[in-house]
Image (cartoon, rainbow, N blue to C red):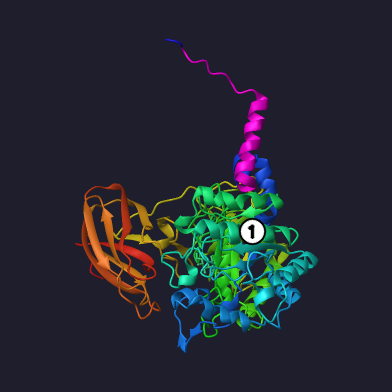
């Protein structure tokens, strides 16, 4: 039997193969295959420094603005055509009514810039198939099918270039409810006009339009694909890739489909409880409850919420892509512009603690706020200003120096103990939303070891939100009065405590939590060893009040380190609950 001789490929052969692969897969795949880590970091640099961008969902859905045949249609506004199964020709009539005469690209870019946003991503084509740019691939576009006849992407590209803001395009590559063959995610065509061949749609509409948006608007910083659904196979995705070569520095997201990872993860309408180790990521979010304009959606998040979201995201190493939904007249709604302006005012003062920073070294341990870091400094974003002025920071560096970002001349007193440093803050917070304390550890950060809670002398065991290890993608420690575990929208997330038990025995277990009507009904278990308790969440006066709830008895057999885990069994509503504390009280103890 002859042994096969394996020879290393000659260098030239390798280069030829690489060239063939490059030609076949285009830049996106090519970047994934050939880019060195240094090249990748260089391409991502501006994006990582930016931290904050503006998403714009603008299309002819802003004409019905959420209302069809006199009925206010539930859900996100840009889906109205699908939600009400509006026939293609009937929906297309909105194009004739779309005349955004108040559109002013310079003004939109100014709003973004004053908000402290460093890039803009606008919908070039959303699922309704209407192109918001001049395209030769279809007459269904803003220049050919509306009285407006102008190309807003051209005007935005010019305004962004002038004002130093990066511009990127959103493009719905798979879903298209207008052109024959376009996909409908999670459903089927509702009008014969939509029937056709998906590959033909890709060849005739999506691929040429992607080429156009990457050819005709100067530098395009980001291409933001969306809803690949299951139609975007690898072969189909590859039809769009060659155009990416037109913009060698472009950043793509993870929504092309066909197994292409792109450059960024894109959690939507949520902030992961920790980031994505080894991956860049960007949370996209609406200011109210819709992406495309709905005239009656006034459920705007407060500036406090939006700013704290931005800080939370930066503290986990991500970007915040915050959406505005302009009207059919071309105006960014005032409540949205106002909040952006307020965010910008905060960033003007505190931007140093956001731009170019990386994730907190403390994981999820800070109950009073969040932390970012840059250039060897830590930025402590204090949401809940301590009433006694003492701010605990879990570091052990002896030569810590700290000051308020707004007052670098005055150093804060700092006492470094065995398990933490304590900063003495002034009586009043410089900012009611988030005040930034700069901390120079005077060398590499020495993290304090995480201590586990201990059974108290009287036998009581308190498992607080601040002591919990939160596992999963959404649930996380929140401040706001007393710390609690909130944002718990993924039922797979769970919390766990390790506790040092001194005196085992039987315990009466209760918990303090809040939940609104949309969380009511969630079922959960509390488990330690072979002991299981279960409970069902109730509405606690619409989430306004924290209530104590008795769960039952459980036995801890042995002293020493014990683990208690709380898991979700079912979650019929939006989120599980806001959990403050689990209390284990010895059953034979004092009743008071
Ligand atoms: O269906 C779209 C939705 O309309 C919106 O564009 C968001 C933004 O991320 N993306 C899709 C849902 O994931």
Would residue 169 be counted in the magenta stretch? no
Q: Which of the two residues, 522 or 198, is positioned nearer the viewer here?
A: 198
Q: Position of residue 474 (x, y in %)?
A: 44, 61
Looking at the rendered image, the quarter that the N terminus falls into is top left
Looking at the image, residue 35 lies above or below residue 383: above
Q: Which of the two residues, 263 or 269, is positioned nearer the viewer here?
A: 263
Q: Position of residue 505 (x, y in %)?
A: 21, 54
- Report the number of discs: 1
Region of the chain picked out in magenta, as a range: 3-28
- Determine if residue 207 is in view: yes
Q: Which of the two residues, 62 or 55, is positioned nearer the viewer here?
A: 62
Q: Is residue 167 left or right of residue 514?
A: right
Task: Say what secondary structure mark 1 lies in.
Answer: helix
Residue at position x 35%, y 60% in the image: 463
Q: Position of residue 140 (x, y in %)?
A: 62, 72
Residue under numbered circle 1:
208
């Amino acid at each position: 039997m002859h042994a096969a001789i394996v020879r290393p490929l000659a260098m030239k052969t390798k280069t030829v193969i690489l060239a063939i692969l490059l030609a076949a897969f285009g830049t996106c795949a090519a970047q994934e295959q050939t880019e060195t880590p240094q090249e990748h970091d260089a391409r991502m640099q501006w994006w990582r420094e930016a931290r904050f961008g503006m998403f714009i969902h603008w299309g002819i859905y802003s004409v019905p603005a959420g209302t069809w045949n006199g009925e206010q249609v539930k859900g996100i506004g840009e889906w109205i055509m699908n939600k009400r199964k509006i026939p293609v020709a009937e929906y297309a009539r909105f194009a004739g009514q779309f005349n955004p005469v108040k559109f002013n690209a310079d003004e939109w870019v100014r709003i973004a810039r004053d908000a402290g946003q460093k890039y803009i991503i606008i919908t070039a084509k959303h699922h309704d198939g209407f192109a918001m740019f001049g395209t030769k691939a279809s007459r269904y576009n803003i220049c050919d099918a509306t009285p407006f006849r102008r190309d807003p992407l051209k005007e935005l590209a010019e305004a962004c270039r002038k004002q130093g803001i990066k511009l990127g395009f959103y493009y719905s590559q798979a879903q298209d409810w207008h052109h024959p063959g376009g996909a409908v995610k999670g459903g089927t065509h509702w009008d014969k006009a939509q029937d056709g061949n998906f590959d033909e749609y890709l060849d005739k509409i999506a691929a040429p339009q992607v080429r156009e948006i990457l050819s005709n608007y100067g530098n395009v910083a980001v291409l933001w694909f969306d809803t690949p659904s299951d139609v975007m196979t690898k072969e189909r995705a590859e039809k769009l890739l060659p155009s990416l070569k037109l913009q060698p520095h472009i950043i793509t997201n993870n929504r092309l489909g066909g197994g292409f990872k792109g450059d960024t993860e894109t959690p939507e309408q949520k902030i992961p409880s920790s980031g994505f180790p080894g991956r860049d990521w960007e949370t996209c979010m609406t200011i109210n409850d819709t992406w495309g304009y709905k005239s009656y959606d006034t459920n705007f998040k407060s500036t406090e919420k939006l700013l704290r979201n931005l800080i939370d995201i930066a503290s986990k190493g991500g970007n915040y892509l915050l959406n505005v939904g302009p009207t059919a007249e071309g105006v960014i709604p005032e409540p949205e512009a106002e909040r952006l302006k307020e965010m910008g005012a905060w960033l003007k003062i505190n931007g140093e603690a956001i731009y170019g920073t990386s994730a907190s070294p403390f994981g999820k341990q800070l109950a009073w706020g969040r932390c970012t870091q840059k250039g060897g400094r830590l930025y402590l974003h204090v949401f809940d200003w301590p009433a006694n002025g003492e701010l605990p920071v879990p570091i052990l560096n002896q030569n810590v120096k700290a000051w308020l970002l707004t007052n670098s001349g005055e150093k804060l007193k700092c006492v470094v103990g065995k398990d933490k440093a304590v900063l003495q803050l002034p009586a009043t917070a410089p900012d009611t939303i988030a005040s930034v304390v700069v901390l120079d550890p005077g060398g590499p950060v020495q993290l304090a070891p995480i201590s586990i809670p201990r059974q108290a002398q009287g036998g009581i065991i308190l498992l607080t939100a601040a002591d919990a290890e939160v596992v999963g993608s959404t649930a996380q420690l929140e401040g706001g009065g007393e710390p609690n575990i909130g944002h718990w929208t993924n039922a797979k997330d769970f919390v766990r405590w390790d506790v040092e038990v001194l005196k085992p025995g039987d315990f009466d277990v209760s918990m303090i939590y809040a939940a609104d009507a949309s969380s009511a009904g969630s079922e959960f278990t509390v488990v330690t060893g072979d002991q299981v308790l279960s409970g069902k969440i109730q509405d606690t006066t619409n989430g306004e009040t924290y209530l104590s709830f008795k769960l039952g008895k459980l036995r801890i057999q042995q002293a020493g380190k014990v683990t208690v885990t709380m898991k979700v069994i079912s979650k019929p509503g939006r989120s599980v609950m806001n959990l403050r504390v689990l209390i284990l009280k010895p059953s034979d103890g004092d009743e008071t």
